[in-house]
Image (cartoon, rainbow, N blue to C red):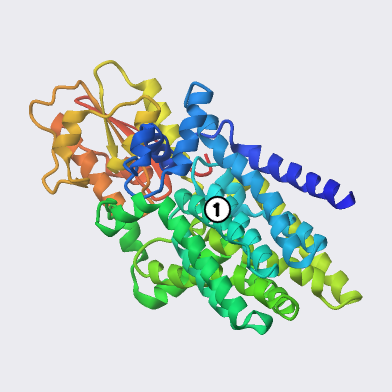
Amino acid sequence: MGWLIALLVIVLLGGLIRGWGVWDRPLWYDEAATWQASRASWLEMARWEHHYLHPPLSFALVRASMVIYSGDAEWVLRLPALIAGIVCIPLAFGLGWEIGGRKLGLWTACLAAVAPCMVDQSQQARMYTLFEVFLLAGLWMLVRTVKQGGASPLRWAMLGVVLGLMTLSQLSGLLVWAAIVLALVVVSQMGESRGRAGLRMVAGGVGAVAIAAVMNHVGLVKMLTGGGGQVEESEQVAAASGGLMRGLYEAAVTLKDLVNLTEAGLVVYGLSAAGLWMLWKRHRAAVVMVVMPAALCVITMIAISTRHFVAPRYLVPMLPAMWVGIAAFATLSREGIWRRAASALLAAYLVLQTWQCLNIERWWMQPDRYLIAAEIEHVREAKGEGEAVVFHPQVIELLGRYYRLPKDETAEAALYEANRLRTDAKLPEAFDAPSVWVIVGMVNYEGRLETGRRVLEAAADHYGVTLDEAAMAEHLRIERVMSARIDRAGVVWHSRGVTE
């Protein structure tokens, strides 16, 4: 019973850490996109018409949460992700236990409980913790099924359902499908699995993927026929472009941030690799099955990062292998002083992780992402009757919609075309609002600073006033969100930054 009490304590602590910032933190843009997609009907979700990219399961759960609690408060939107993030902890224990026993399982659960990426995603109305739930459950089922010979069609069918739910949560599941089939092909050529037993396992894995594909057939057909929509081009694409070397650099930074937000992050990969090597000598098949999704994820990330920004949350398929490897390093090191030293090192790492998780807004990526909502609320309180509002870039209008600060349709139509600022952007002569508020956010790229300046100039020209260059330089800067109230009397500036 001691292990069960320890697991309950780990889950409780992990839940408290995850709940730390759920209740009163404002939304950021991606969460506003979740809110928008979750307002689609059940039928639209079944048809994959709710969002241009992401599958429907996480949005359906957010919609259910809004129905149950009769509202769309921030915590209501985040509740499904929070619950999924907590569920990941016992599932991580189960995977570790299946591979190497209870001690390895408890260490794995500890690592899942204080993983900054999982804590961050548990506090957001997004789909990545739900994806991780089904990934951990699927790997646990896969390892168990292979250990038992892979002869049960029912187990493969159940695995197929889990893989289907995983991909209904996030499209990285397609990568996991391929990884599982490849892993089973490799395992089928190892030791006692050769011959008919190995072929039976490969067939079972292919059957599981087929069931998952049937569950996702609507989305797969839309993607294959080009009906899934297109990702909007942004400065993120341009900023990440730079060829293979730039891609490798971005990959290294993102890999570090996935497991730890200091330079110690890359060292952790060495510990994990050492632990997986120790585990390889005892449970080769299990190592192949947890490492294959991580390996394909890294290859895909390097390819994507040459053309597009890659965030740590996109790499969550790597986490099970990382956790198992680090836990194995502590539990399988040579007995005596070596094992005690490894356990002490892992304990110190967990303390560092816990500290970072409790200070997640300071340490995690994009600490300015919540500033847009704060500035929108400021403008909503200060805005007078008849005054117009314009958002730049246009996409943050979603946050304005959530916080009941609607955009001015006439101004937007004049300034924007096809989600881009017009080259001849200006307000029409018939635009008769007494003043216009311009909110500029998400300016982490130089290109957005320039286009934000053009929006401000268009508004100032309409009212016949001149922008103060010194004031604009102070407020329109990277890692700041600003608003400007412009009328014929002049410009009133306001902005906020990360440290304010």
> Residue 486: x, y in percent?
25, 29
> Residue 340: x, y in percent?
87, 70
Which of the pair 467/128 is nearer the observer? Answer: 128
Q: Secondary structure at mark 1?
A: helix
> Residue 494: x, y in percent?
38, 33
> Residue 398: x, y in percent?
34, 35
In the figure, is residue 428 to the left or right of 416? left
Q: Quadrant of residue 138?
A: bottom right
Kind of residue indicated by mark 1: Val
Which of the pair 372/305 is nearer the observer? Answer: 305
Does 378 sit above or below residue 12? above
Tell me which residue sits at (39%, 33%) in the image.
Answer: 42
Crowding around mark 1 (Cα neighbors within 10 Å: few <14, some 14 to 19, many 20+) is many
Does 38 sit above or below residue 196? above
Q: Is residue 410 visible?
A: yes
**Which residue position is annotated with label 1?**
162
